[in-house]
């Protein structure tokens, strides 16, 4: 999901959609200075400032019969920055967001990312790019590697699609389905483990965990893959191969750790095509 934030109405939508990032955390913060060469003075001059904040936050979304957890990672790009402040001392942590305050006035946007204004930005406009997935019913294990793909449109592939593509890629796998815990998230379609065929006798939790979900926060479908030990019996290679297969086959956005990127960025210099 990508949306431009320019007006007071856009800002009201942002605060409502994110619940003002309440209880979230700024995981990455980048300050980018744009410079141009001035021929008259013979030196470079500042031509604008952009601040990018990556924010991870959790929401409780009301479903048909109960509330369900949703995990979101948002990349908020603020351009045309005219004033900003990043302040942290004596053990304080500016990255912890209590609740974000924002206003639009005089053609500019103002953001206070915590009550004390330790992270404060004034800018001309902003853009939010976001990936969502069903929230975990229990915390992820330490050291777990995770990658999420969110497609804007299209049909969610079945397990057989993954098995077929992995066979063609020379990475045959067995499928071990997992019965969803009750109550499961309403967007969840299926989940289980892809275990490399070479890893016979692996534990039920071995291999790569795949969680597939349907429409969530306006997306068509999403797929999250996780590996508890990327060094175990080819699991690391399988994780990357799965990510490449998904990114090559569908249009959408990738989330790797706290980094949001389009599929072209994930695939790098590889030629983007349909299928594998």
Image (cartoon, rainbow, N blue to C red):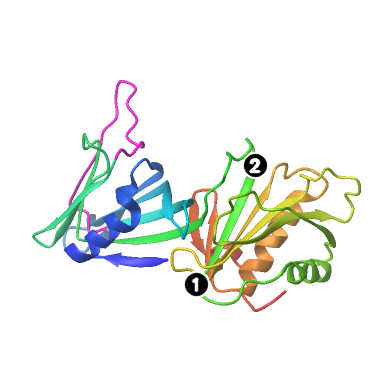
| Residue extending farthest left | 106
Q: Position of residue 28 (x, y in %)?
A: 42, 44
| Residue extending farthest top | 90
Q: What secondary structure is found at the residue carrying circle 1? A: loop
Q: Which residue is tagged 2?
A: 144
| Cα distance in 3D space between marks 2 and 1 | 26 Å
**Compared to 184, does 116 lie above or below?**
above
Using a 10 Å C-alpha cutoff, classify the residue at mark 1 as few (fewer than 14 neighbours), some (14 to 19) or many (20 or more): some
**Compared to 256, does 89 lie above or below?**
above
Quadrant location of the C terminus in the rendered image = bottom right
Q: Position of residue 99 (x, y in %)?
A: 28, 42
Using a 10 Å C-alpha cutoff, classify the residue at mark 2 as few (fewer than 14 neighbours), some (14 to 19) or many (20 or more): few
The stretch drawn in magenta includes residue 202: no
In this orientation, which residue lies closer to the viewer: 200 or 268? 200
Image quadrant in which you'd find residue 108 = bottom left
**Compared to 81, does 163 lie above or below?**
below
**68 left or right of 108?**
right
Q: Which residue is tagged 1?
A: 152
Q: Residue at x 33, y 39 (%)?
A: 97
In this orientation, which residue lies closer to the viewer: 22 or 265? 22
In this orientation, which residue lies closer to the viewer: 140 or 256? 140
**243 left or right of 4?**
right
Q: Which residues are magenta?
A: 79-98
Residue 271 appears in the figure: no
**55 left or right of 224?**
left
Q: Residue at x 69, y 67 (%)?
A: 245
Quadrant location of the N terminus in the rendered image = bottom left
């Amino acid at each position: 999901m990508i949306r431009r934030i320019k007006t007071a109405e856009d800002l009201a939508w942002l605060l409502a959609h994110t619940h003002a990032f309440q209880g979230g955390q700024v995981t990455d913060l980048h300050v980018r200075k744009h410079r141009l060469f001035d021929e008259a003075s013979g030196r470079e001059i500042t031509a604008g400032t952009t601040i990018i904040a990556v924010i991870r936050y959790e929401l409780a979304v009301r479903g048909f019969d109960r509330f369900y957890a949703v995990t979101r990672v948002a990349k908020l790009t603020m351009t045309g920055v005219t004033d900003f402040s990043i302040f942290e001392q004596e053990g304080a942590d500016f990255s912890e967001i209590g609740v974000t305050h924002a206003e639009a006035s005089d053609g500019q946007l103002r953001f206070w990312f915590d009550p004390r204004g330790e992270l404060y930005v004034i800018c001309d406009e902003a853009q939010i790019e976001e990936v969502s997935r069903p929230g975990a019913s229990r915390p992820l294990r330490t050291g777990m590697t995770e990658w999420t793909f969110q497609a804007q449109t299209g049909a969610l592939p079945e397990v057989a699609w993954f098995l077929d593509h992995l066979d063609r890629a020379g990475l045959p796998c067995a499928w071990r389905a997992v019965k969803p815990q009750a109550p499961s998230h309403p967007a969840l379609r299926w989940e289980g483990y892809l275990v490399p065929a070479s890893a016979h006798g692996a534990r039920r939790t071995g291999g790569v965990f795949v969680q597939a979900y349907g429409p969530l926060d306006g997306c068509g479908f999403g797929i999250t893959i996780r590996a508890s030990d990327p060094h175990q019996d080819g699991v690391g290679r399988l994780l990357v191969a799965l990510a490449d297969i998904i990114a090559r086959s569908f249009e959408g956005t990738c989330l790797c750790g706290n980094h949001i990127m389009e599929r072209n960025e994930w695939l790098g210099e590889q030629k983007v095509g349909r299928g594998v």
